[in-house]
Amino acid sequence: MMLAPVFYYGAIHLAPAGRAATVSSNFRLMGKTAFEKIEKAQQVQSEPDTVFDPYIAEAERAVAVANTAAVTPADRREYTQLVSYLHAVKQDRLLMQASNDGGPVDHEQSNIARSSAERMFR
């Protein structure tokens, strides 16, 4: 009986930490949409600029919307994964354009970023 106040106040102090570790449902939905848009942009990254640019612009808009929905620290961590994936796709595109010889481009960085984001949003 005497330990009841200790447990009560302990639970109050631990509650914010639990909330900070939880991803909000709003961000989860927006993040999943952004992930799918980035994935589509990655699929067309070998196409000409007229095809790729609208896809990447749509992905950037979706990531910006997801940013507005990120409110908890857990949301911010997952948002960072989305941004990392988006930048990896854009970097791969630049590398493909720079290597005009048609040789293979190393997609390892974007594949790592994709798998990391995929674990969060699939």
Image (cartoon, rainbow, N blue to C red):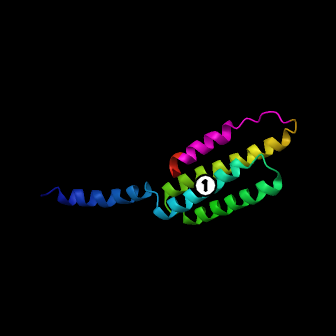
Residue that sits furthest to the top in the current view: 103
For mark 1, give the secondary structure.
Answer: helix
Q: Is residue 8 left or right of residue 78?
A: left
The residue lying at 18 percent from left, 59 percent from top is 4
Q: Is residue 27 left or right of residue 97?
A: left
Q: Which residues are magenta?
A: 102-118
Residue 70 position, x and y percent, is 54, 62
Q: Main secondary structure of the magenta part?
A: helix
Residue that sits furthest to the left in the current view: 1
Q: Is residue 94 left or right of residue 10?
A: right
Residue 63 position, x and y percent, is 63, 59
Q: Which residue is mark 1?
A: 36
Q: Quadrant of the N terminus?
A: bottom left
**Residue sitting nearer the eye, 36 or 116:** 36
- Is 70 within the magenta? no
Residue 55 position, x and y percent, is 72, 57
Q: Is residue 113 left or right of residue 44?
A: left
The residue lying at 43 percent from left, 56 percent from top is 22
Determine which quarter of the picture holds residue 92: top right
Q: Does 93 appear above or below 62?
A: above
The residue lying at 70 percent from left, 52 percent from top is 41
Amino acid type, label 1 = Glu
- Is 105 within the magenta? yes
Residue that sits furthest to the right in the current view: 101
Q: How many marks?
A: 1
Q: Does 53 appear above or below 96?
A: below
Q: Judge the density around disc 1: few (<14), some (14-19), many (≥20) Cα neighbours within 10 Å.
A: some
Residue 104 position, x and y percent, is 78, 33
**Residue sitting nearer the eye, 4 or 27:** 27
Determine which quarter of the picture holds residue 107: top right
**Residue sitting nearer the eye, 17 or 1:** 17
Q: Does 70 appear above or below 47?
A: below
